[in-house]
Image: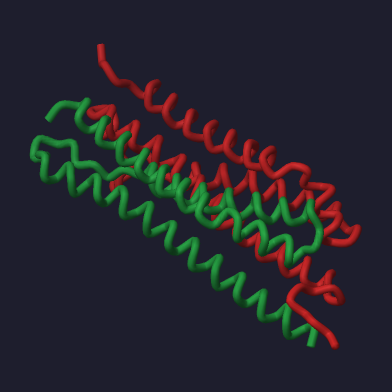
Amino acid sequence: MENSTFILTYILTFLFCLTVTAGIIILINKGLKRFFENLSQDNDVAIFFHKLTIIIILLGGIGAALKSGYNTGESSNWLTLIWDSAAQAQESLERLLVTLIILAITFFILHLVARRVNK
Amino acid sequence: MKNWTEFHISIIYFTGLLVALGSSILTIFYLRPIKKTIEKITKGIDFFWDRSFKTTIILAGLLGAMSVSFRNCSGNYTYLLESRKETIAKGFEQVSASFNYLTIILGLWLIIFLILQLMGNKHKMPGVHKD
């Protein structure tokens, strides 16, 4: 297979991962903003927490998407290329899932603590 | 004359380090104004927190990039001289590892700051409706 095929597949998969990451950020953006405004009751602090969460998700998604374990040897064919591309996307999606789950659990615990402290 | 030499490998290596350092600095720029906000969160004792926050971000970025080894299991780098694709992939791996370290460190700081914020705001917490 030609070099350009590998590069094109890598770039396309990376763009797919980037789109998914951006999509998730857009999806939870409004809720996050309201959560932090409610939690901190200060606009500057809420913006800081919001930015911090966005950058965590973004770096997590991009960081995993950049890693490539493509088999570029002579034994490579279209099937191995598809598997390698799927592995790249899987890595990114897996990282996003773990990041979101950890964030969700953290926010849940903090919300519970906040309610308890005020009782 | 060799097509792909040690010089090229070192360029990829240092580019990876520079990209990692650049991303750490950009992250700090994106989060501005850090000092003012941390002062609000920590209620005045901002000196330690602000410096620690910035330093750990830069260190995490650099350490992530440095954690990727260009040598194979037997300590050789000759396989990179034979394949420029593999060298470039190593460069991407450096940036990827740097982003991973940054994600972990930023996540830890987020939790620390959220707890500090909650402790500071004990008396005006959200979701509380006192009769």
Q: Position of residue B50 (x, y in %)?
A: 79, 50
> Looking at the figure, which quarter contains the C terminus of chain A?
bottom right
Q: Kindly identify the residue that appears in the image at 56 percent across and 42 percent down.
A: B62
Residue A30 showing in the rendered view: yes
Which residue is more in the foreground, B79 or A32? Answer: A32
Q: Is residue A70 left or right of residue A106?
A: left
Q: Is residue B16 left or right of residue B82?
A: right
Relative to B6, say whether B33 is above or below.
Answer: below
**What colouring method underlies this structural image?**
by chain
Q: Chain drawn green, letter?
A: A
Q: Kindly identify the residue that appears in the image at 79 percent across and 74 percent down.
A: B125
> Looking at the figure, which quarter contains the N terminus of chain A?
top left
Q: Position of residue A78 (x, y in %)?
A: 11, 40
Colour of chain B in the rendered structure image = red
Which residue is more in the foreground, B36 or B58? Answer: B36
Q: Position of residue B101 (x, y in %)?
A: 53, 52
Relative to A78, say whether B85 is above or below.
Answer: above
For residue B112, what is the image quadrant?
Answer: bottom right
Q: Position of residue B83 (x, y in %)?
A: 24, 29
> In this figure, what is the number of numbered marks?
0
Q: Kindly identify the residue that appears in the image at 52 percent across and 53 percent down.
A: A57
Residue B78 showing in the rendered view: no
Q: Kindly identify the residue that appears in the image at 20 percent across and 27 percent down.
A: A3
Residue extending furthest top? Answer: B1
Which residue is more in the foreground, A9 or B7? Answer: A9
Which residue is more in the foreground, B6 or B31? Answer: B31
Q: Is residue B82 left or right of residue A58?
A: left
Residue extending furthest front? Answer: B131
Q: Is residue A70 left or right of residue A114?
A: left
